[in-house]
């Protein structure tokens, strides 16, 4: 599908921006139009993006819209790929697309578990890669490298104990200047 067909999207559904990078078409959407847009792209005879190949999360720390949810679509009929991006802040939920693409179930749970991006109307939104008692979201850029809890074997108690990690604030607030030695 050529770029001219992508430009015709403006007549079919609303989007915020279109980018073509390295031969890939990328469309940035509002979270409110995500389900409608995906439904159109899946059902419309000229596009037929019937295969969802991936959903991933991105953390843009210190930006207004901190998180991005990226949807990679494939049209087998036209042998084309399309990438959709939805940008949200920490409190804005994204609508679940499990009703449109059944395989979105696992990926939405993964993005929830690792980034904390909430998906409205998801049938079973719970942790999938981390333990149920795990605190925080490990793929966020502000998550401490050592986590929040330390597990160690206690000789006196003869068992594994879990204790909160005490780090100095200096190590948690890492800046680029610190890495260069400009304290």
Image (spheres, grey):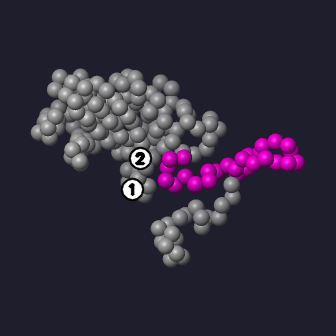
Region in magenta:
138-164
Neighbours of disc 2 within 10 Å: few (<14), some (14-19), many (20+): some
Asked if marks 1 and 2 touch (Cβ < 8 Å), the reply is no
Q: Which residue is mark 2?
A: 58
Foreground pick, 158 / 114:
158
State the image coordinates of residue 28 (x, y, percent, origin top left): 27, 43
Above or below — where is 147 with respect to 102?
below
Q: Residue at x 52, y 71 (%)?
A: 178
96 horizontally vs 175: left or right: left
- The quarter of the picture where the C terminus appears is bottom right
Q: Residue at x 54, y 46 (%)?
A: 138
Q: Residue at x 40, y 23 (%)?
A: 102
> What residue is drawn where x is 39% and y is 56%?
63
Q: Of residues 47 and 66, which is closer to you in this image?
A: 47
Residue tagged 1: 63
- The residue at the far left in this view is 4
Q: Separation of disc 1 and disc 2 at Cα?
A: 12 Å
The residue tagged with tag 1: helix, strand or loop? loop
Q: Is residue 7 visible to the viewer in this orientation of the structure? A: no
Q: Earlier in the sequence, mark 1 or mark 2?
A: 2
47 magenta-colored = no
Few, some or many C-alpha atoms within 10 Å of disc 1 (few <14, some 14-19, many ≥20)? few
* Residue lying at the far right of the rendered structure: 156
In the rendered structure, the answer to whether residue 68 lies left or right of residue 8 reads right
Let me know if residue 149 is in the magenta part.
Answer: yes
17 or 33, which is in the foreground?
17
Q: Is residue 57 above or below residue 96?
A: below
């Amino acid at each position: 599908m050529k770029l001219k067909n992508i430009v015709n999207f403006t007549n079919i559904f609303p989007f915020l921006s279109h980018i073509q990078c390295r031969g890939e078409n990328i469309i940035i959407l509002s979270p409110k139009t995500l389900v409608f847009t995906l439904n159109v792209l899946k059902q419309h005879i000229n596009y037929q993006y019937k295969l969802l190949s991936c959903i991933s999360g991105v953390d843009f720390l210190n930006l207004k819209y901190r998180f991005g949810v990226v949807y990679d679509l494939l049209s087998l009929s036209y042998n084309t790929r399309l990438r959709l991006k939805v940008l949200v802040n920490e409190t804005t939920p994204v609508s679940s697309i499990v009703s449109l693409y059944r395989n979105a179930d696992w990926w939405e749970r993964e993005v929830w578990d690792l980034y904390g991006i909430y998906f409205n109307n998801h049938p079973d939104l719970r942790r999938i890669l981390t333990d149920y008692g795990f605190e925080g979201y490990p793929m966020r850029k502000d998550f401490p490298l050592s986590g929040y809890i330390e597990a160690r074997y206690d000789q006196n108690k003869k068992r594994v104990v879990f204790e909160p990690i005490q780090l100095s604030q200096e190590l948690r607030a890492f800046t680029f200047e610190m890495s260069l030695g400009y304290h």
